Amino acid sequence: MIENGLFFNLAAGFLSLAEPILQGYCLARLVKPFMERTAKVRLVWAVYSLAMLLLIAMNCHLGAIVSVMIGISAALLAMCRTDPRNYEQKLFLAAAFFSLCWLAYAITEILYDNLYSYATHTDFMVKSPDYLWEALFAAMCIFYLVSEITILLASIWCVKKIYTYKSANMTKKELCILLAPLFTGAVGFEIIQYYRSFYIYEIGKSTEAYDTWALIYYGVSIAVVVVVIGLYQSIKANQEEILQNELLAAQIDSIRHHIGQVECLYQNIRGIRHDMANHIMTLERLYASDQTEEAKKYTTALKTALVEVVGEIRSGNPVTDVILQEWKREAEKRQIQFLCDFYYPAGSDINVFDVSVILNNALQNAVEHTAKNASVSIRSYCRNNAYMIEAVNSFTGNLQWDSDSGLPVTSKTNAEGHGYGLVNIRRVAGKYAGDIAIDIKDGKFCLSVMLMMDMKL
């Protein structure tokens, strides 16, 4: 049967138009979790599809591989222009799609050729009229398209499933490691396709054994890509755990420092108590000698000394007092107004260490991201058995959000531990069956932390 009729040309034309559009959809599915907005993902889909369709319309004889490279390069440029961050990751996604696209095509081509060859050599098709041949060709075109897109989507699903830390920055060394299996898969594809085309040209078809081993190779190549990404993510998980452990150790040292300050505070208070009799005796003598003005000055000086020793903040716990007092001094040093209406839930099962972790992280984020002459406030209150902590600071600008954690993404994710404060706060809240909420409105960034408490009788 010679496939050069109008129907065959229409079916082949439909396949050539539908394939790049569906491939663009697959590319959009791959990059969606790694980009900020759905509109940008749709743009990537549109750019890839339009670039491929334009090459078809121009009847450019560049070869399929070069055409797909042009389409992916256009999509990569669109990704980088609309979302200018983590370029190494975007390059990896483009390379991964290129490799998976050709591996899916190679598997589909072998299945298509063998199934079509088997169908055309059956007695039924040999004796069939032309319209059945046309129906078979149309069915095989649909089979080809569905098989290719299904294999590609399944591969992409595996990649997205195993790629856990989607917001983490990728280094150039990590990019090189991840590109290695993609490169070997693409080179293997070229070699196998060359010899398969040679067999088809020489004997009219490829051997069954060759096709079987080719399918095994393509399947293993996809599996290797997924496994390498999984290993890369496990390394990221270990790095994350090490960094968070270091941060926790630093916070423990900070708490020990606060406890040491509390001990100094108690020593100072004991010293004041020891001298209180002398202060009272001095005041009595001043009043007895009718030196009222001197007595008032002495009283004012004594109050000032008490405030310097004890501090202005009374939160119901000496540890939280020290933490709040330190951040108040830090805020005033930065010319930021510090408002405090915080009270520790005495008589509850909430540990002061956990509260101190929340306060340190929340106030660090608030003070460091607040401009001069603005304000930071911290308050707490109870609603039934829910203990609420709210930290509010002035905020202008836009935030990038992590689609997995639902938390803002900060550019400060270096060894100093920045960018993990909210994660640590959420972890502490989870210990008390609580969670955190973030609200941005009217130029204010509001962090709300809820802890469920059991009151001790």
Image (cartoon, helix red, strand yellow):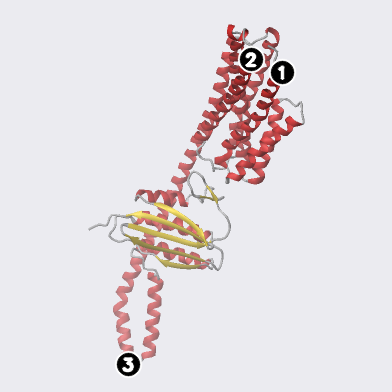
Give the answer, above or below, for where 329 lies relative to 178. Answer: below
Quarter in which the N terminus is drawn = top right
Name the residue rendered at 65%, 10% in the picture: 205
Point out the tag, 3 or 1, that comes first from the N-terminus: 1
On the picture, is 308 further left or further right than 116?
left
The span from disc 3 to disc 1 (Cα, nearest Å) is 124 Å
- Depth check, front residue: 19 or 425: 19
The amino acid sitting under disc 1 is: Gly
Mark 1 surroundings: few (<14), some (14-19) or many (≥20) residues within 10 A: few
Secondary element type, mark 1: loop
**Can residue 228 be seen at all in this image of the molecule?**
yes
- Reading the image, the residue beneath label 2 is 133
Mark 3 surroundings: few (<14), some (14-19) or many (≥20) residues within 10 A: few
Mark 2 surroundings: few (<14), some (14-19) or many (≥20) residues within 10 A: some
Residue 341 percent coordinates (x, y): 40, 67
Give the answer, above or below, for where 58 lies relative to 80. Answer: above
**Residue 270 picture quarter:** bottom left
- Reading the image, the residue beneath label 3 is 289
Name the residue rendered at 30%, 61% in the picture: 346
Residue 210 percent coordinates (x, y): 60, 12
Point out the tag, 3 or 2, that comes first from the N-terminus: 2
The amino acid sitting under disc 2 is: Trp
Residue 213 percent coordinates (x, y): 57, 14
**Residue 142 picture quarter:** top right
Name the residue rendered at 39%, 50% in the picture: 428
The amino acid sitting under disc 3 is: Ser
- Reading the image, the residue beneath label 1 is 5
- Depth check, front residue: 286 or 89: 89
On the picture, is 217 further left or further right than 386?
right
